[in-house]
Every structure is written in C-alpha cells, then in structure tokens.
Amino acid sequence: MRLLLLLSAALAIHAETVKQGSALKVHAPAAAVSARLNDRTIRLFPEPGGTTFGLMPIAIDAKPGAYTLDLLDKSGAAIQTVPVQVLDAHFRKQNVAMAESTAALKPSPGEVETTAAFRNTVSDTRYWTEPFELPVRGCMTSPFGVQRYLNGKPTGAAHAGLDQRSPAGAPIHAIAAGVVRFVQEWNLHGRTVAIDHGQGLESIYLHMSKTAATEGQHVNKGDIIGYVGTTGRSTAPHLHWTIYANSIPVNPLDWVKVAPCAPRRDVPKPTARSTSRPRQ
C-alpha cells in the first residue's frame, strides 16, 4: 500500500505509483470530503492535523496506466488533482485440485448477498491502527491476486485473499481492532467471521472449524475470533482471509509479512530389505 501526501499549503503534489490490487492512503486538505479515481469515489474522514483521510483501492483487474485522482469538496468540485500511475502486478496463475463434490458446492442462501452488503459498509469510526497482526503464524500457500484454475479449468476469478497453512484447531486472531459484523456457517465460505475496522477497511476469515466471536462484539487486535478448520470449499486445514478497502479486496502483503511455504517434497518410500540370514 502506498502513502499519498498532499501538501496543500505549498500546492506541492507528488505523483504516486501503485500496483494492481493495492490501495492508496490518501491524506488530503481539510476541504476535501471525497476522492475520485476513474469511476470510483471514496469518502474522506477528518484526521488530526486538519487533513482528511481515506483508502483508494486499485482493483486486481485495473488496467495499468496513467490515472488522475481528484479531491472533491462538498459540492463535488475538484479542488486538487493528483497523477497516479497504476503498475502491472504480474499476478501468476494457480491451479487448485479438489474433489468434484467439493468443487460443485453452491453458495448458501444469502451467502453472496450478506458478503456483498458487508463489503459495501463504510462506518464513520476508525478502530484500526498499524501495524496489523497476522491472524495465524502459518506460511503462505496461496498469494493474493493469482488467477485461479479449478481442477485445471479456468474459473475466471482471481484469488481475493491470502491462504495460510495452519494446523486444525489453531487460534485465529483479529488483524486489527473493529466490530464483528456477522458470524455465519456457509456452503462455500464455511464457518466465517467478518470484522469492520472502520472508515472503509474490513477483514473476513473463512473455513473455520469453530467460531469464537459474536455479531456486534468489539474486538481488539490479537483477540481470538475462531479456530482453523477446513469447512466449506476447502481441501485441507488452512485460513483464507481477505482485506477490503472500500469494498475492493486488496493485497494483505501490503499490510503484513508472510513467508511463502517451501515446496513440499515427496518422501521416498523405503525399499524392501531382506530379513533372511546370510549363508554360512
């Protein structure tokens, strides 16, 4: 995630570069109440120091190239314009092999709608501060943004979160403070907890074996919200988690550091050994 600094007093504006799937931290003059980039407009919130702040997400599939970020006042008029260069993140492809019965799972009633409503929520209070905490300690099995194939067939979708290997039953921690917006058990997501961190930042945690949070609960960074499992469309115990910035999934690796898992090597089978005694 990049930091965008707007020095309104001197009218000095720094051009910014940002990769696909990342977010710009926008610090703007106090008169700016929203920001617009291409066809996306976000709210800006007052912050200490007489400026406003918001998160401008860049979608995974945004076309690389030159853009402009407009800072808008209450009337919707642009008071400043900032050049932004979106870079190609060079997301890879990844195939996931799973049983056909698991691959054929369909969303539970309300699963898609509830998740979409959560993503689109923008609450006024900011609960989060940096740095964020890793939800589990496991290494990364699937990075953000990879183009997903399922049993060798393209899904047409990118991986919108991060997968971490972790043993079943390991505790899952909130990455930052916030309010739990829902706790559900679904066909695709499995047992799920969603947290609103405020001012357009949210996180969601999937495939739990057991949840440990309740809807409406305020949680602090590091609080246990559930336990690792393999419920829903999952092939083994792990945690899939996603960060949303103003409804758009953004790369968790801009916020935390996670080492990729080392490739697993097949252990050679022991060769048969004779138990007969040598001849005398």
Image (cartoon, grey):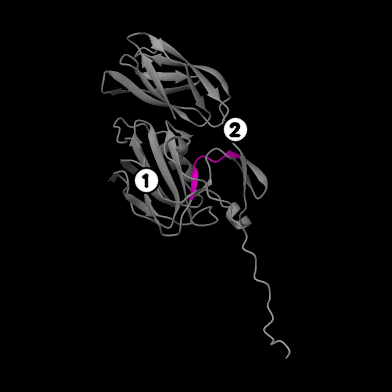
**Residue 9: where, in percent of width, then height?**
32, 9
State which quadrant residue 271 falls in. Answer: bottom right
State which quadrant residue 272 falls in. Answer: bottom right
**Residue 179: where, in percent of width, then height?**
31, 41
Residue 77 seen by the camera: no
Point out the image quarter for the N terminus. top left
Residue at 50 percent of width and 54 percent of height: 232
Q: At label 2, which amino acid type do we have?
A: His
In what element is the residue under mark 2?
Answer: loop
Point out the image quarter for the C terminus. bottom right
Q: At label 1, which amino acid type do we have?
A: Phe
**Residue 136: where, in percent of width, then height?**
41, 50
**Residue 161: where, in percent of width, then height?**
49, 41
Report the disc number at residue 182: 1
Q: Nearer the viewer, residue 267 or 49?
A: 267
Please give left or right for residue 73 compared with residue 1 in the image: left
Q: Is residue 127 magenta?
A: no
